[in-house]
Amino acid sequence: MGSSLAYWLRRLEPTATVVVIERDPTYATASSALSAASIRQQFTTPVNIRISQASIELLRHADELLAVDGSKPDIGLSEGGYLYLARHSELESLRRAHAIQTEQGAEVALLNPAQLGSRFPWLDTTDIAAGSLGLSGEGWFDGYSLLTAFVRKARSQGVQFIRGEVKSLEVRGPRVETVGLADGARIRCGHVVNAAGPWARSIAKLAGLELPVFARRRTVYVVACRARMKPFPLLIDPSGFWIRPEGAGFIAGISPSDDPDDAPLEPEYAGFESVLWPALAARIPAFEAAKLERAWAGYYEMNVFDHNGIVGCHPRIQNFVFMNGFSGHGVQQGPVVGRGVAELILYRRFNSVDLSELAYERIALQQPLLELNIIG
């Protein structure tokens, strides 16, 4: 989010002074680097669908947009699609979501069990009533490569990246005047943008603001399976697991039964054998012979209010800007949200994609904009 915003600010206004304060420039614990980095249009809120439609276009041209001195990044975009499965009890919800998506122009097909079996013979559809398959504009990419491409491009544009940790915000009246760092440095500012991901709540508190965003750990399992299964979209199972191809194998995850805030970034290995593997083997019989190769953990920046992003200025502190709480879909939305926030700062309006539904005001008014299709 922060590096995307920095890029767009300098692209739209080359004279803008842009400083990114980065606690860890290695990005070892950055959600972008640790994400499963996938993109979909199968949401239940139209604004999310519109963001992803614009984002896939940007990702398709990332090599040109983010090239530096003729060197083009390769983000490994693969448009393999998403497949949501539904049992009979979930069928109406799937149909309602499909209606919203197609109304917004998404290419999504509803398939019955026979059609699913024909397309994906490796899939057990015994208890499945239907599946929703994205036909275009969905897939996955390399989140770390996208992040570093934005950083490299922003640096080439003159953006200053400072290694430091924000410790204070000096608020006077309706504005943040200065940002204080742990080493004692103070930076005067025209705008302060909170792009701290899972740590966004602590930054908001420095300005005396409440933000319903919490760090929720998710484990990604790297799984090997010898069986040849193609095509293989990113599969979302009613039991709560997801799986997609990655290199010669697969990566997968499952919704945790216990979901505490700020859990250590250590993989939860026990969940693979006790929960995920049995569910995988039940849905995809070839995975009875699967092998866990390794795992890693990353954070969702979970907006517990309504699972949607919080974008734009605070109504009281007018130059404090949010781009937080994307609840697992921040990497795919970052290219578009970065552009939108840059427009808001420079022009006081959204020019490309209207993100006004994601404003902080809905939090203050207790009017949630609920997103129901949250994965993991």
Image (spheres, rainbow, N blue to C red):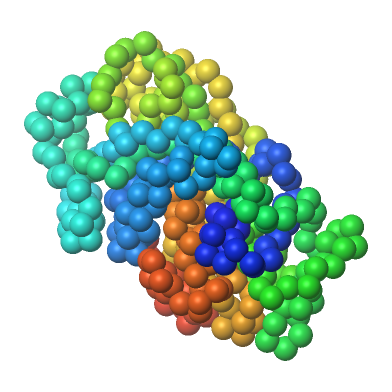
User: Which residue lies at the image location 38% right of the left edge and 26% below the top edge?
Assistant: 245
User: Which residue lies at the image location 57% right of the left edge and 42% below the top edge?
Assistant: 68
Q: Quadrant of residue 264?
A: top right
Percent coordinates x, y for residue 105 in the rendering: 20, 57
Percent coordinates x, y for residue 17 in the rendering: 69, 66
Q: Quadrant of residue 192?
A: bottom right
Residue furthest to the right in view is 184
Q: Is residue 96 above or below residue 109?
A: below
Q: Quadrant of residue 46?
A: bottom left
Q: Is residue 236 visible?
A: no
Q: Nearer the viewer, residue 275 or 7?
A: 7
Compared across the picture, whether 61 is left or right of 15 comes to: left
Q: Nearer the viewer, residue 9 or 268?
A: 9
User: Which residue lies at the image location 67% right of the left edge and 55% below the top edge?
Assistant: 158
Compared across the picture, whether 335 is left or right of 288 comes to: right
Q: Nearer the viewer, residue 4 or 117?
A: 4
- Quadrant into which the C terminus falls: top left
Q: Is residue 51 visible?
A: yes
Compared across the picture, whether 219 is left or right of 349 comes to: right
Residue furthest to the bottom in view is 173
Percent coordinates x, y for residue 206 in the rendering: 74, 70
User: Which residue lies at the image location 25% right of the left edge and 42% below the top edge?
Assistant: 136
Residue furthest to the left in view is 114
Residue furthest to the front in view is 69
Q: Is residue 163 above or below residue 352?
A: above
